[in-house]
Amino acid sequence: MNDELTPSERAALRARIVGGAHDIKPVGAHGNAWIAGSVAAVLVVAIAGGVTVTSTLSAPEIATTPSPSPTVTAEPVPTATPTDVSTPTPAPTPLATAPVLAFGGDCSAVLDDSAASSVVGVPMRLWEGLSVWDARSLGGISCHWRTQDSSGWQSVGVSVLPYSVVPDAVRAKIGVAPVCEGGPCDYSERFGDAWVSAYASSDSVAMDAVAAVGPRAATSPGTERALPAAAWHLDDCQDRLRGAVEQTLGRVGLEPVGTDNVPQGQEWDVLTGRGAAAWCSVAPPSADDPDFFTLRLSIAAGLQSDPSEVERFGGIPVQVDGARAAWWIPPANGVGGRLRADADGGIIEAVGTDLTQEQMRALAANIIGALG
């Protein structure tokens, strides 16, 4: 570039170079967006400093014949401020909405006692027991009603869960009429994003309960919950924990308790399929064993107990190694007892017969250790 350019000619050349620099298109949406502004800044500074530059942007030739008019002191050429085309700082990702339980976690919103009584055909009331695992761990709700008159005992249970947590094997049972002999009498349907399941003593009651809850469940299906990172991985409960029990009690050859009173049904299949629950039992192989006992273990991954609720059901705080908190719940009928313990991985509840509180506390500590 010739130092004898007039101010107007300098301005014209600068405009051409800056315009050419801005015509450079970045390769990606963000990665090279700085090129245009940087090139423009370098070229403009070069012009202002009087450096000889060979233009590679096809600028037209500018006449260099000296002007016949008297020499005029050149006006200062203002340095152009580069256009800021840097990549904008992305806005922070908003925090995810806290998980919401189906029906807000309120069983009376699922069915009040009057509606439950209408479904079953006899007076019913909500049963408030001390559960270990239920649909809350996955964003749902589990509710149970029982007859007020014990002479004609009946019960009905309803569970609502986000459809997204239901495994394919359970989805295949949706809309299939229940078979109530020799298995759980439960029935399920999908309503929008909600999966609704009910169990009862008859197929008609189970189906009627689902029909009574389903349309409203579609507006309150709950939000899927992931288990906490520290939650126990529940697999092979029987084989994994039998060794801990045998070691604690100094026994070998223990077997599952011989009973069909085990958790089952579609809700249970969802909970176990998602790794949220486990159940197993151990006992000596023969009831004639002079030291015969039974032990049933219920485990919930990632959940923690409400201390006030446990104590409302008779829980007495006790010390268990490896537990955040633990309670001994004496038996209501004098047979057996319950030891409930919370650890980082979740809740365990051991229900035993012919086992002392000290044995149960030692068992709970070793089971927590075995679960990791």
Image (cartoon, rainbow, N blue to C red):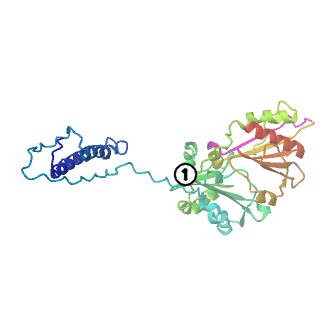
Q: Which image quarter is the N terminus in?
A: top left
Q: Which residue is denoted by mark 1 in the rendering?
A: 163
Say if the magenta span includes residue 241: no
In the image, 269: left or right of 3?
A: right
Closest to the observer, 26 or 236: 26
50 w.r.t. 145: above or below: above
Q: Which image quarter is the C terminus in?
A: top right
Q: Residue furthest left?
A: 68
Q: Say which amino acid is labelled 1.
A: Tyr
Closest to the observer, 249 or 200: 249
Residue located at (68% from left, 67% from top): 113
Residue span colored magenta? 272-289
Q: Residue 313 in the image: x percent, y percent?
A: 81, 58
Q: Residue 310 in the image: x percent, y percent?
A: 79, 56
Q: Residue 66 in the image: x percent, y percent?
A: 9, 46
Residue located at (88% from left, 32% from top): 250
Residue located at (29% from left, 43% from top): 42
Q: Residue furthest bottom?
A: 114
In the image, 354: left or right of 273?
A: right
2 w.r.t. 85: above or below: above
Q: Is residue 141 visible?
A: yes
Q: How many marks?
A: 1
